[in-house]
Amino acid sequence: MAIRVVQAGWRGYFTTAEDMCTSLVAAKHDGTWSTKLRTYTAPTILVIDDVGLLPMPDRTASSVFFQVVNTRYQRGHPTIVTTNRGLPDWGDIFGDSVIAAAILDRPMHNAIVFNIRGPSWRLREHHGLEIATTTNPR
């Protein structure tokens, strides 16, 4: 979807959750917050990849993630979020179930959720590695 939006002439931006939060937390400290926030809130579509791959390092990171999602929601700008974690795990990811609920509330209001199960698409040609990563150790 994001590619089609950009091909149609609209602005789009792709980032990982970690890169976005690291960049925004640094901007809070160096005085470039407003400019950096626009990087993530101005494009017509934003893709935030790998949410929950790594936990948020602190509440400041969780807070800036919320501010991006909330600003985009208020402007009616679509945000695509990819994650390998279930929604009940988001309290752990953001270190606070209230912040996680507030973050989820915005995009879930008009969301379409795709729950893809099964082996990793990237590992499809490496069956031995797939077995090793899905087998429970004893």
Image: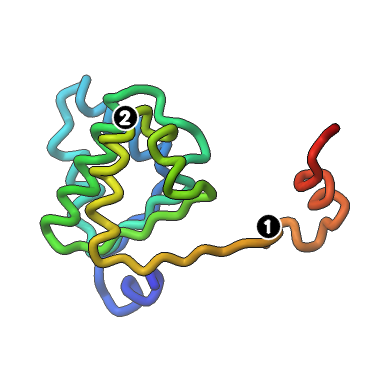
Q: Residues within 10 Å of mark 2 (few under 14, many from 20)?
A: many
Q: How many badges with numbers are in the image?
A: 2
Q: Which residue is mark 2?
A: 61
Q: Looking at the picture, does residue 135 appear above or below residue 109? A: above
Q: Which mark is residue 20?
A: none
Secondary structure under tag 1 reads loop
Task: Identify the image quadrant of the C terminus.
Answer: top right
Viewer-proximal residue among 4 and 110: 110
In the image, is 85 to the left or to the right of 11?
right
Say left or right for 16 vs 63.
right
123 lies left or right of 132: left
Q: Residue at x 35, y 40 (%)?
A: 20
Q: Where residue 63 sits in the image (x, y, percent)?
A: 24, 32
At which x and y percent is residue 135? 81, 45
Which image quarter is the N terminus in?
bottom left
The answer to whether 51 is drawn above or below residue 82 in the figure is above
Q: Residue at x 38, y 35 (%)?
A: 91
Amino acid at pointer 1: Ser
Spatial CA span between label 2 and label 1: 28 Å
| Residue 9 sits above or below residue 128 on the image | below
The residue shown at (40%, 42%) is 17
Q: Which mark is residue 120?
A: 1
The percent coordinates of residue 54 (x first, y second) are: 50, 34
Quadrant of the rendered structure where residue 56 is? top left
Toward the viewer: 131 or 60? 131
Q: Position of residue 51 (x, y in %)?
A: 44, 44
Determine the residue located farthest toward the bottom in the rendered image: 8
Q: Earlier in the sequence, mark 2 or mark 1?
A: 2
The residue nearer to you, when weighing 34 against 138, is 138
